[in-house]
Amino acid sequence: MTVYASWNGATRVKFWRVLSGQTSARLTPVVTARKRGFETPIAAPAGSYFAVQALAADGSVLGTSAAVRPS
């Protein structure tokens, strides 16, 4: 599974954390990747739902996406 992360205009994002779970209400971290350019592809294990957190250099969460089902 490849998850793509981007946040137009966000300059403080240094890392992306992918969350995954069997339901949208029960997500846990599965992988963290360094931001690379405008859109970062991230290899993640298969899951039923995914969300992505934008992280600052110190690891603090800048924002979290809505949970979605892969299509």
Image (cartoon, rainbow, N blue to C red):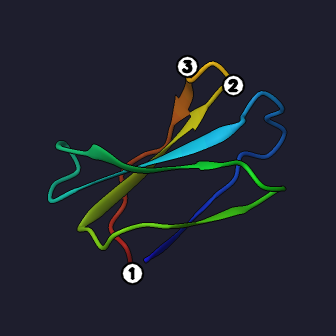
Q: Quadrant of residue 7?
A: top right
Residue 41 as seen in the image, left or right of residue 70: right
In front: 47, or 59?
A: 59
Q: Which residue is mark 2?
A: 57
Q: Residue type at mark 1?
A: Ser
Q: Is residue 43 left or right of residue 23?
A: right
Q: Residues within 10 Å of mark 1 (few under 14, many from 20)?
A: few
Decide: marks 1, 3 in contact (CB < 8 A)?
no
Among the two numbered marks 1 and 3 on one chain, the one whose residue lies closer to the N terminus: 3
| Residue marked by disc 3 | 60
Mark 1 residue element: loop
Q: Residue at x 28, y 61 (%)?
A: 49
Q: Alpha carbon of mark 3 to alpha carbon of mark 2: how far?
A: 7 Å
Distance between mark 2 and mark 1 Cα atoms: 31 Å
Mark 2 or mark 1: name the one nearer the start of the chain.
2
Mark 2 residue type: Ala
Classify 10 Å Cα crowding around label 2: few (below 14), some (14-19), many (20 and above). Answer: few
Quadrant where the C terminus is found in the figure: bottom left
The local secondary structure at tag 2 comes to: loop
